[in-house]
């Protein structure tokens, strides 16, 4: 079929209406999907035998606590709502319902829905095999639900999860119950640990996750990872039910109020409110006192990358040619070479002649990856903007600018059979990498801005990276947001991150991580050539080609006339757009999400080159422009230290 097509081809539609063809069609689709997504050789063990896959947690989920609907109506409601996030998990679906009060007529119910991203769901549950009468050579049962929800040993607790738990082996040792686990899923550790430690489970997890647990005794628990790498929303229904979901779109019809579920928090039926579990000491600048240790920085990042290579599917690396993605790609290649595994493919996108493409090509040649370069035109980007806004669920200008090429690239990558990619999000926020950080007056203010940026990352870059890729069933993993790496670099004395142009040290943004890898590895080979290692920061939306942003602005200026823009405050009283580009994005957003509560899930305020509103005060010209009501530009070129700086105020 046509790659990425949203509707079935006519022949398949005709066949689907004929009963005689339905079973054959279903089997054919299942086998074709698996075959297209994964080369059979990738399933072979070193002996040449085919092995069952470890079940993956990447997907989309939906949960509700205390619905007043009867069980059948609730099941149909969950099914209807889950369909809206099926793009996140096209490989399987599952629904589970439990009453809040068992054997009590008229009891309210909780429910879980799940849309799973995986290759094959290999069921190793002995009870399931027995019930299915599986014996002899055919000792594996493959279920359409893909093994989610996952269950506790007594099946009284159910889990729907989107995520990867990297310390699952350590957690398995912590679980006291010796009963064999039903699956090979790293996420099964969550449900068994919750059965023993309850609400403390989230703080024990090392990974990226968003999940909900429902129990037969009225239990309900939902949690999100510390940085908000995996997207998650919560909403409140008219009947008092509390809803949780991977994306906002499936809550729109049912919930009167919707919010982004805050990272590093959990919600429990015990308190019926959010509780913050992630409270690192470095939230307070007083605890950022550690001296530079390049070996520790390098080793911790290498470990963060290594743990994210836990996968059973073909994977790749997003390679823009900038520092962050290039470092990840180089490290992954070295790890693969060390253990004799094939090197991953690398992927880049841009307008023809874009700075990112040339740099990505040079890095790929240097590290020796099979590199795939994709081009798009300004018109193709503009054509995709409506879909981008629908999937990203935002009207933030920078997120849309960067999300559009990422959305286009993810579609191409998924069509090639790749299901997971590593990406470089997070480095700029934790290391002061954006060009506006050159304006930081001192280390303390730089650190506080890094903390603000990290704590808001789920509203911007994490949202973009997760949703732009999951729109096509592609999972993105971000090593720079590893908990251990965050602790190392955010505990540094922030003076280490200050930029001192012209000096021998700290002469460029993110100098600490550049210098940590400015040496040979154990085999005497460099990580990256100096022209890449010390390349100036280029925001992704700029690096794909300066004409992309300029073309998008030009298009918005044609669509939004001066009269429309003059009355923008009347049409958009909340977060009033300051530019025609922002007005254009807002118009599209409200077509898909026409409610006041949806508007409030997107932040606002002045910003320069991705800064927070507080950092605008670092520069007198920025501060003056903001006070005058000018909408500051978020392109990196708006900062005067950029090599292609533009006068925009």
Image: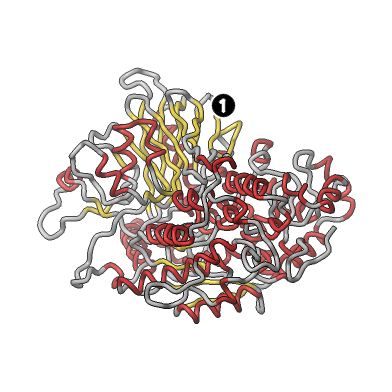
The vertical placement of 176 against 101, above or below, is: below
Instruction: Give whichever of 283, 40 is nearer the camera.
Output: 283
Q: Classify the position of the C terminus by image quarter.
A: bottom right
Q: Position of residue 314 (x, y in %)?
A: 38, 67
In the visual, does 340 lie left or right of 510?
left
Q: Position of residue 118 (x, y in %)?
A: 37, 57
User: Circle 1 sits on which residue?
Assistant: 238
Instruction: Give whichever of 506, 439 is nearer the camera.
Output: 506
In the visual, does 643 lie left or right of 482?
right
In the visual, does 71 lie left or right of 230?
left
Outermost residue, left direction?
136
- Residue at left offset 64%, top offset 61%: 402
- Residue at left offset 73%, top offset 67%: 642
**Residue 538, quarter of the rendered image:** bottom right
Q: Badge 1 local density, few (<14 within 10 Å), some, or many (20+)? A: few
Q: Position of residue 19 (x, y in %)?
A: 35, 56
Q: How many tags in the picture?
A: 1
The vertical placement of 73 against 594, above or below, is: above
The vertical placement of 225 against 313, above or below, is: above
Helix, strand or loop status at disc 1:
loop
Q: Position of residue 412 (x, y in %)?
A: 52, 69
- Residue at left offset 43%, top offset 26%: 269
**Residue 145 showing in the rendered view:** no
**Residue 338, quarter of the rendered image:** bottom left
**Residue 210 showing in the rendered view:** yes
């Amino acid at each position: 079929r046509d790659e990425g097509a949203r509707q079935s081809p006519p022949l398949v539609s005709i066949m689907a209406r004929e009963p005689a063809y339905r079973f054959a069609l279903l089997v054919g689709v299942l086998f074709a999907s698996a075959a297209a997504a994964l080369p059979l050789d990738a399933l072979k063990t070193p002996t040449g035998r085919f092995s069952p896959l470890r079940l993956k947690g990447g997907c989309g989920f939906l949960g509700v606590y205390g619905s007043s609907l009867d069980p059948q109506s609730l099941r149909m409601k969950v099914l209807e709502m889950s369909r809206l996030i099926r793009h996140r998990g096209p490989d399987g679906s599952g629904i589970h319902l439990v009453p809040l009060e068992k054997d009590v007529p008229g009891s309210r119910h909780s429910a879980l829905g799940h849309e799973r991203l995986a290759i094959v769901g290999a069921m190793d549950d002995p009870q399931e095999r027995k019930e299915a009468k599986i014996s002899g050579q055919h000792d594996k049962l493959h279920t359409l639900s893909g093994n989610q929800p996952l269950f506790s040993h007594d099946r009284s607790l159910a889990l729907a999860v989107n995520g990867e738990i990297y310390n699952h082996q350590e957690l398995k040792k912590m679980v006291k119950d010796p009963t064999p686990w039903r699956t090979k899923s790293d996420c099964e550790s969550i449900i068994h640990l919750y059965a023993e430690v309850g609400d403390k489970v989230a703080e024990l997890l090392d990974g990226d996750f968003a999940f909900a647990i429902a129990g037969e005794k009225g239990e309900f628990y939902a949690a999100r990872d510390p940085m908000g790498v995996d997207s998650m929303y919560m909403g409140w229904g008219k009947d008092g039910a509390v809803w949780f979901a991977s994306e906002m779109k499936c809550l729109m019809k049912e919930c009167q109020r919707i919010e982004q579920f805050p990272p590093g928090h959990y919600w429990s039926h015990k308190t019926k409110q959010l509780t913050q579990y992630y409270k690192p000491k470095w939230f307070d600048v007083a605890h950022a006192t550690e001296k530079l240790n390049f070996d520790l920085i390098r080793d911790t990042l290498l470990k963060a990358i290594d743990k994210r290579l836990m996968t059973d599917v073909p994977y790749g690396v997003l390679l823009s040619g900038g520092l962050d993605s290039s470092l990840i790609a180089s490290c992954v290649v070295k790890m693969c070479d060390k253990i004799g595994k094939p090197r991953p493919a690398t992927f880049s996108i841009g307008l023809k002649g874009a700075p990112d493409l040339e740099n990505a090509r040079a890095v790929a040649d240097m590290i020796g990856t099979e590199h795939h370069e994709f081009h798009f035109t300004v018109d193709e980007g503009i054509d995709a903007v409506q879909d981008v806004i629908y999937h990203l669920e935002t009207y933030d200008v920078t997120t849309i600018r960067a999300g559009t090429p990422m959305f286009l690239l993810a579609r191409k990558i998924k069509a090639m059979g790749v299901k997971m990619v590593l990406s470089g999000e997070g480095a700029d926020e934790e290391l002061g990498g954006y060009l506006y950080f050159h304006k930081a007056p001192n280390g303390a203010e730089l650190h506080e801005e890094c903390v603000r940026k990290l704590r808001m990352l789920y509203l911007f870059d994490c949202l973009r990276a997760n949703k732009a890729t999951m729109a096509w069933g592609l999972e993105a993993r971000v090593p720079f947001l590893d908990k251990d790496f965050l602790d190392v670099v955010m505990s540094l004395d922030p003076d280490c991150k200050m930029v001192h142009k012209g000096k021998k040290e700290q002469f460029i943004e993110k100098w600490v991580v550049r210098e940590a890898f400015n040496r040979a590895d154990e085999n005497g080979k460099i990580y990256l050539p100096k022209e890449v290692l010390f390349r100036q920061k280029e925001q992704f939306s700029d690096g794909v080609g300066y004409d992309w942003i300029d073309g998008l602005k030009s298009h918005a200026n044609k669509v939004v006339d001066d009269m429309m823009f003059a009355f923008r405050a009347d049409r958009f009283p909340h977060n009033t757009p300051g530019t025609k580009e922002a007005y254009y994005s807002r118009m599209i957003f409200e077509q898909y999400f026409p409610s006041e509560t949806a508007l409030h899930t997107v932040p606002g305020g002045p910003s320069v080159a991705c800064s927070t509103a507080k950092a605008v005060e670092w520069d007198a010209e920025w501060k003056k422009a903001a006070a005058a009501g000018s909408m500051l530009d978020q392109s990196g070129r708006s900062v005067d230290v950029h090599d292609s700086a533009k006068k925009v105020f």
